[in-house]
Amino acid sequence: MRLHLLLLLVLCRSGSTSGALSYGLGGSWRIRSGNGSLELLGTVPGCVHSALFQQGLIQDPYYGFNDLNYRWISLDNWTYSKEFKIPFDISKWQIINLIFEGVDTVSEILLNNVTIGKTDNMFNKYIFDITNVVRVMNSIELRFQSAVLYAAKQSKAYTSREVPPNCPPLVQKGECHVNFIRKEQCSFSWDWGPSFPTQGIWKDVRIEAYNICHLNDFTFVPMYVRRTQVWNLEIQAFFDVISPTPVGGQVIIAIPELKIQQTNSITLQPGARIVELSVKINKNIPVKTWWPHGHGNQTGYNMKILFKLDKNLTIERSAKVYFRTVELMEEPIKGSHGLSFYFKINEIPIFLKGSNWIPADSFQDRVTSDLLWLLLQSVVDANMNVLRVWGGGIYEQDEFYELCDELGIMVWQDFMFACALYPNEQGFMDSVAAEVAHQVRRLKSHPSIIVWSGNNENEEALMMNWFGIKLVDLPVYIKDYVALYVSNIREVVFSGDKSRPFVTSSPSNGAKSVEEGWVSQNPQSKFFGDVHFYDYDSDCWNWKIFPKARFVSEYGYQSWPSFSTLETVSSKKDWFYNSSFSFHRQHHERGNYKMLYQAGLHFKLPQSSDPLRTFKDTIYITQVMQAQCVKTETEFYLRSRSEIVNGKGHTMGAMYWQLNDIWQAPSWSSLEFGGKWKMLHYFARNFFAPLLPVGFEDQDVFYIYGVSDLHSESKVKLTVRIHSWSSLKPLCSTVTNPLVIKAGEAVSLYKEPVYKLLKRCGNCTRQSCVVSFYLSTDGGHRSPTNYHFLSSLKYAVGLLKPHITANISQQHDTFVFALETSAVAPFVWLDVGSIPGRFSDNGFLMTEKKQTVLFYPWKPTSKNELKQSFRVTSLTDIY
């Protein structure tokens, strides 16, 4: 099946409206506990936890065991209140609305002691008509219910059937029945995050007043006629017309760079009205397209829309217009009985390489513009082009998607359902429909979003029977599943946005799942759709354990964050691997053991007699293990893109779990809480490079593939070097004749039996030598230098303890670390503690005496500060 969708996108940047007023109610509010014993000031947008912390009434909620100590906050029913004066003459306005962009979550809203409405969905926008209630001086109250108690009550009241899971695993230390409330699902805990079920007004709140009519929203939908190669931009403007008679006028649409100046006459009938307009773009004028990072520029065009209506009413909007096409390709593949699953952007197949995004904090008011920029800049700095906004978190704030647009980060957008079944009660379904309609209208204008996905892992949970459902009951649960994700969510999505594909779940078999009635017997098939893969028991250095699937949208291994990150939320008594704190922070069953087990397969574990040294060394070895495991797995997916083996392959996506952290704890992330790069993120910068040599063994034969994400073929030479662990001088070096790597393909470049490779390099053995290799032209390196270990490093022979020094100098805003080593050093880790910034490379294999690495600070620092904080570690330092 070929799903062919094209997209022209417009983003609102600014606007001015006459005939309407807006008055913000953000800022200082009063907050009181359920019994009135605690009253304090808090900020809106915000939540109760943040207010208590800001007023000094609690510690940092992330410190120590405070997620348990402060459970009482989530179990109370809090009230937000504010008194305010309307700064305009309310008698002159026909309609006055109170608008909440986001309320978390269950509340009753009173204005001047009159109930004006209720909320029960964190992801919805609420508009209340207060025309007949508002006065010059006003009091407003939001009486919240505990999300935990509300969810439990809803679950108890739902008697049709059990809706599992009831509670999270005990190791997560979380709350129950989160699937009965439309709230951030991971706020009740997850296997990488704490339980902080917040209450509060988490987005903007304002009053809007208007006469005659009001523009509530406008959206843009493209129509592309292939036969004539012409774009038609279809605009929808959503009006509330309160005039008793029709309102006439003109709308003027201007896109100067595309030489568009179009005027249409319109007539607005009373009531809720949608004005539909179409703009034809002259095909003789070249249009620059929006491209993912690494594939081209993110070009946009400025557009202005001006509504000139009766009674001198004018409404103006400015917008940014982006052009790009997206297609989800599900077609037969030669040599396989399955279907492909990959994306074309602007008619070019794109290998999606990236990660999965979770909420950046349990308390969204702490997610600043600077933090978003830092995290997303780190995505493109690591050569990624995609993020999946995971379905157990939130629909991210507008700025997140704006940054993704500007940086060229494609977004796989889940709807907020994860690892659970959900009730089919009509009120719940109606709330979901309103949520989806709102979010689609809010987000559809972003070129970065390339696919909607109904949920995270719920098809797999149902069909692989995670919850022990009796076989006789399965049909009714399947019916509920289809009703929610297909009849409800899918229908609402396509009624609001036909410009991009929709998949019901991740993982899913895509078109095959549709064919089987929207659920597949095996949603993890390697022949269809996308897969999620985790295996902590098998050896991650053995590439044969990984699925040669069409698209891998989740996979990964855990590690601990750096000591400087943990230090801020712990004390000396916590600083050893088997401490109560270490077990408390680990929310994955036996996670701490699994990390050391996997590390122990190939590395000696820390042996220091100093407990603190051992703890820091253990953190280091978990990061080494994670980086090497994910590298091996990702490189397998990268080199599988152009081949079919036993019907499997044609892999076109690798998105590891997970990009970022929600707090300071062990997890699968490559970025620590706050943004510090783990070793994995440095590795990702290399293994996601646009041109990469990948080495692996099969039946004692050593292969090197060349992997290209470029749009044109590359003519390169391959250099292969052998070092003994005991010498910085290479034993031998081979340079090939010029080789060709075709655009967007993975091709075999080199093949040699290992025994021959070792034999021609003197006295090499698997244990005493290591292979490194890179691609080059006459102009220099065209790829990172990659490496291949011929044996486990715990069996390495001749590996010395190096003495590594660094001379630090400053060049403008960048610092230069001139490194010098006395011996070959694997996994060289440079650390400057809590000084924010990143290195140009880290965690590397140092095979030359001298190497220069740059440090890019994120905040002003000095050479002396860096010198005092600098530590270097390599593998043998932990022995």
Image (cartoon, helix red, strand yellow):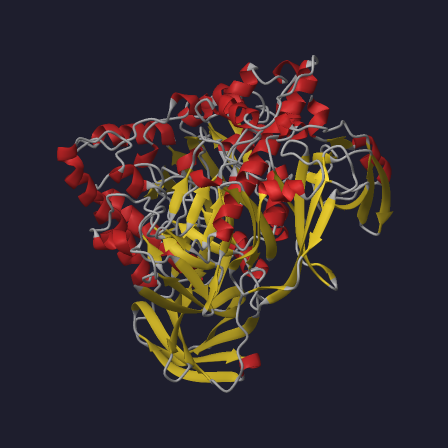
Residue sitting nearer the eye, 421 or 195: 421
Residue sitting nearer the eye, 42 or 512: 512
Tell me where residue 796 appears, x and y as whole percent: 66, 29
Residue sitting nearer the eye, 655 or 708: 708
Q: Is residue 444 visible?
A: no
Horizontal arrangement in the rendering, residue 40 relative to residue 873 (left or right): left
Q: Is residue 40 visible?
A: yes
Tell me where residue 207 appears, x and y as whole percent: 46, 53
Residue at 52% x, 45% y is: 634
- Seen in the picture, residue 58 relative to 461 is either above or below; the reply is above
Residue at 53% x, 78% y is: 287
Residue sitting nearer the eye, 535 or 479: 535
- Seen in the picture, residue 759 relative to 561 is either above or below; the reply is below
Q: Residue furthest left?
A: 472
- Place residue 75 in its image quadrant: top left
- Place residue 271 in its image quadrant: bottom left
Tell me where residue 306 appears, x and y as whole percent: 48, 76
Q: Which quadrant of the rendered structure holds the C terminus?
A: top right
Q: Which quadrant of the rendered structure holds the N terminus?
A: bottom left
Horizontal arrangement in the rendering, residue 735 relative to residue 511 (left or right): right
Tell me where residue 755 appears, x and y as whole percent: 60, 40
- Seen in the picture, residue 809 relative to 621 is either above or below; the reply is below
